Amino acid sequence: MSKEVVLEKLVTNQKRVDFYFNVKGGIQKYFKKSKHLFFKYNLDIEEVPTSILTIPFIANIIPLVWLTNSKIIVPELDRAFYDCLPKLKEAYQDMFPEVKLGGEISVSSIIENSYTPDHEAAQLFSGGLDALATFVRIREKKPILITEFGWHKDHIENSEVWIQDMLHVTEFGKRKKLSNMLIESNYGTFLNASIIDRDFAKKLGDSWWHGLHHSLAIISAAIPSAFLLKVECVYIASSFFEGFKAKCASDPTVDNQIRFASGRVFHDGYELNRQDKVGVLVNYCKKNNEYEKLRVCFLKENNCCNCEKCIRTMVGIIGEGENPEKFGFVTSTNLSTHIKVFLEENVKYFNGSKIMQWNLAKYKMRENRENIQYQDLLEWFLNYDFALERKKSLIKYRITKFIPIIKRRIYTKLTNIFVQNT
Ligand SMILES: [Zn+2]
């Protein structure tokens, strides 16, 4: 049987659009039973044409269609988006040369949509470091701030994380006199990502969500409202740095190809590494004497200050001569001790890219030595050799982990011999 995804019904109701679809053939296992994808906006989208509303539906599924050499069938699609699809596919193919991308899209009518832009920019805005750095860079354009929560199940459920996100970004928007676009969806849960990973992650060298899905999901969700508000360009902040080529769906080679009606997408800040971004933000805050609370912990209400991302960001802020507390990282312990204890326990898990990022903060600290507020940290951190400490920690970990196992094995063997002999 041919492998097909067919859009059966698109229902709009004020601020909401629901897609109901059918899946045929061997790709059914990759979809949840409900075959339902929805988006809810904080503005009425009933006037948005079907050909534009269909964009997020296609964008969330087409990488899977390519990966599984299947077909996706929809009645209508926007011309600009339809035309950019081969370029997106090519960009993915370059990123994942190990897999052959195939598949096709069938559209009954391709519709020309256009507008004269009313807003120069909209920006995907999580409140994290990447997003804040991009905001600082494009603030003169007065971007509309787009914030999303894609983790609902089939229905909208109460989520503390989303409530906190909304409070945070709307407060920011109010203070900066910018409007907020808020979007809720189930794009993060409507597929069986673990089954896709089971079949493809090894070949791809990356997960479905990270490697192929998330960037298109996030960007395309914003397109219906960007169309409605006549946005010229949707900015998405880079999470990777061009100096460290990573496989990831969120890449300028993919994002910058996206077109819809008269709008386009720009992947911002790719030339900046994470420490550079901390610098951009710290300088901006110092100049305004207004400190922004960073939100870096994924799917958490507050920064935990204990995970790698939190602590790496804190070290980055210290490197710029600032106090992490002003940016929303509050710890009760002495910072130098806090970081030391974290590294003792966790440096063994650091891969090459993590070590590179931590080193960027270390070099900054070295360069900026006289402005660092934590002398006790400087005493040991500047000479901390991440690669060496990782090696040492791994040896120690293996010894403490394996000696009891070996002991137990010897004991079991001896007991077996003893039992057999009696
Ligand atoms: Zn954290």
Image (tube, rainbow, N blue to C red):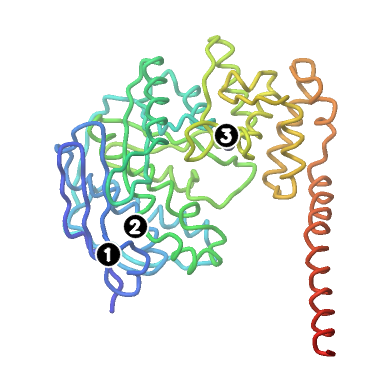
Percent x, y of residue 264: 35, 38
**Residue 157 drawn above or below residue 70:** above
Question: Quadrant where the C terminus lies?
Answer: bottom right
Which of the labelled discs sits on residue 79, or is there none? Answer: none
Q: Amino acid at mark 1?
A: Val
Tell me: 138 left or right of 409. Answer: left
- Which residue is labeled 3 in the image? 304
Q: Is mark 1 within 8 Å of ligand 1?
A: no
- Which residue is labeled 2 in the image? 61
Q: Residues within 10 Å of mark 1 (few under 14, many from 20)?
A: many
Q: Residues within 10 Å of mark 3 (few under 14, many from 20)?
A: some
Percent x, y of residue 306: 63, 36
- Which residue is labeled 1 in the image? 5
Does label 3 or label 1 sit earlier along the sequence? Answer: 1
How far apart in space, not on screen, are marks 3 and 1 (Cα)?
41 Å
Percent x, y of residue 261: 26, 40
Does label 1 or label 2 sit earlier along the sequence? Answer: 1
**In the displayed image of the protein, which residue is found farthest to the front?**
422
Q: Residues within 10 Å of mark 2 (few under 14, many from 20)?
A: some
**Residue 14 drawn above or below residue 74:** above
Q: Amino acid at mark 3?
A: Cys
Q: Is mark 2 within 8 Å of ligand 1?
A: no
Percent x, y of residue 293: 52, 23
